[in-house]
Image: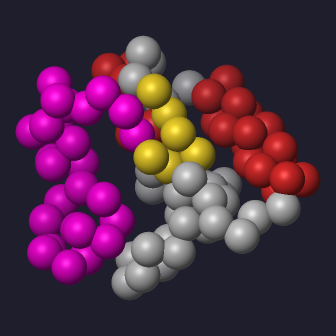
């Protein structure tokens, strides 16, 4: 979503509102908006509001990271849970 909104200049939140009934899973990773880097998620980023939106409570969330140590994946699961509890 981050790459598409930068490439085609549309509002990511408006897009999610438009397609919300068709979202059955989310592949989650961080990137710089220019390249699909598949980095671990980070605190205080725009995507947390969408990930933990009540509309998507039952939507599958898939962590999609590349070249990431198991310890970093475990830490990211912890970050995911911390953000979930904040909502």
- Position of 65 with respect to 30 (left or right) is right
**Front residue (pair 18, 25):** 25
Q: In this view, does 68 lie to the left or right of 38?
A: right
Query: What is the residue that sits farthest to the top in this orientation?
Result: 58
> What residue is rendered at 13% in x and 37% in y?
19
Please determine whether, in this image, residue 3 is positioned above or below residue 76.
below
On the picture, is 22 further left or further right than 85?
Answer: left
Q: In which quarter of the image is the C terminus?
A: top right
Q: Does the magenta stretch include residue 57?
A: no
Question: What is the total number of numbered labels drawn onto the structure image?
Answer: 0
Q: Is residue 32 above or below residue 2?
A: below
Q: In this view, does 5 lie to the left or right of 67?
A: left
Evaluate whether residue 86 shows in this view: no
Q: Where does residue 47 sit, x and y in percent of width and height?
A: 45, 50
Q: In which quarter of the image is the N terminus?
A: bottom left
Res 78 visible: yes
* Residue under the point 42% across and 81% down: 35
Quadrant of residue 40 within the rendered picture: bottom right
Does residue 28 sit above or below 84 in this rendering?
A: below
Q: Residue at x 34, y 65 (%)?
A: 2
- Magenta highlight range: 1-26
By secondary structure, the bulk of the magenta-drawn segment is best described as: helix
């Amino acid at each position: 979503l981050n790459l598409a909104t930068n490439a085609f200049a549309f509002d990511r939140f408006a897009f999610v509102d438009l397609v919300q009934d068709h979202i059955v899973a989310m592949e989650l990773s961080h990137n710089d908006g220019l390249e699909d880097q598949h980095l671990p998620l980070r605190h205080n980023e725009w995507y947390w509001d969408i990930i933990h939106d009540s509309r998507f409570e039952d939507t599958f969330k898939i962590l999609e990271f590349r070249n990431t140590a198991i310890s970093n994946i475990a830490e990211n699961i912890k970050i995911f849970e911390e953000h979930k509890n904040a909502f």
